[in-house]
Image (tube, rainbow, N blue to C red):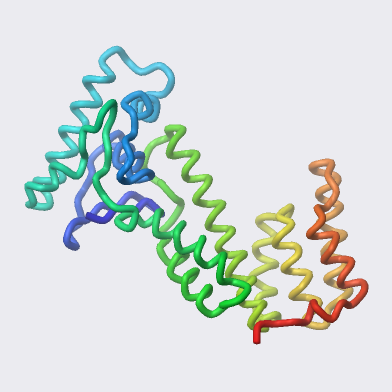
Amino acid sequence: MQIEILGPLRVSSQGVLIDIPGEKLRAIVATLALSPGVTVSTSDLLDELWGERPPRSAVNSLQGHIARLRRALVTQSGEEEMRHVIKTSGSGYMLALSPRDVDASRFVADVKLAGRKSATEPMEAIALLTRALGAWRGPALLDTGHGMICRTAAAHLEETRLMARELMIDARLALGAHHETIPELEQLMSRHPLRERLCEQLMLALYRSGRQAEAISTFHRVRHRLSTELGLEPGPGLRNTLAEILRQEESLLHEAS
């Protein structure tokens, strides 16, 4: 069975899509899919489905939802063994799948591996990140309710997605694609104007493209916003990038061989 949560929930078995009817059933699948092979406690599932004040019948209702979910998996897949994908385990329930069966787990693993390769093996990093970012079909956990577990996970996945784009830009800059990355960086900066890593990358791309004055003005623009909106000064990474540009450090022009 494959579960996809990088967008609307999608469940399939042997290429056959399985409809998970109802928001609460989708929330159960998504919550379990965030930790495949790990027991999620009944109390956490109750909080996810009903919040801090579940009804008195919530435990029985959860059991009923689990039974409906198992029936849906068996009926739509035509595979009796699918009944055992959702296991009762200790004080909760577990999704008996490997992390490789869940798109979000594969995505995070690919991004972590790309992070270790972006500086030394940029082409391999680009291949990993292209696959990772290509798995997204929309906002993470789009139709799985409003519980805290899914909302927190969605925010974390979206942050990792942005980090993946930053790693992709690192790898492309290492390969000398300065001009090509500038439009994408400017677009990302318009959506994340206080993101210092993006600012560093844009400054580097501009500098390598012979646009030193624009690289310096980018720093001052972000510094002003950090000061007026957050009361903060730029971090050491951004300050060091400015200093290296002002000194016209030769190391700024180094690319992957």
Q: Is residue 211 above or below residue 70?
A: below
The x, y position of residue 69, in whole percent, is 19, 38
- Residue 185 image-quadrant placement: bottom right
Q: Is residue 257 above or below residue 223?
A: below
Q: Is residue 203 left or right of residue 28?
A: right
Q: Residue at x 49, y 50 (%)?
A: 157
Q: Residue at x 39, y 25 (%)?
A: 47
Extreme-right residue of the structure: 247
- Residue 172 image-quadrant placement: bottom right
Extreme-top residue of the structure: 56
The x, y position of residue 86, in whole percent, is 21, 40
Q: Nearer the viewer, residue 133 or 97?
A: 97
Q: Nearer the viewer, residue 121 or 253?
A: 121
Q: How many marks?
A: 0
Q: Residue at x 41, y 47 (%)?
A: 142
Location of the N terminus (image quadrant) = bottom left
Location of the C terminus (image quadrant) = bottom right
The x, y position of residue 106, in whole percent, is 39, 59
Q: Residue at x 40, y 54 (%)?
A: 105
Q: Nearer the viewer, residue 127 or 115?
A: 115
Q: Is residue 165 left or right of residue 212?
A: left
Q: Is residue 61 above or below residue 134?
A: above
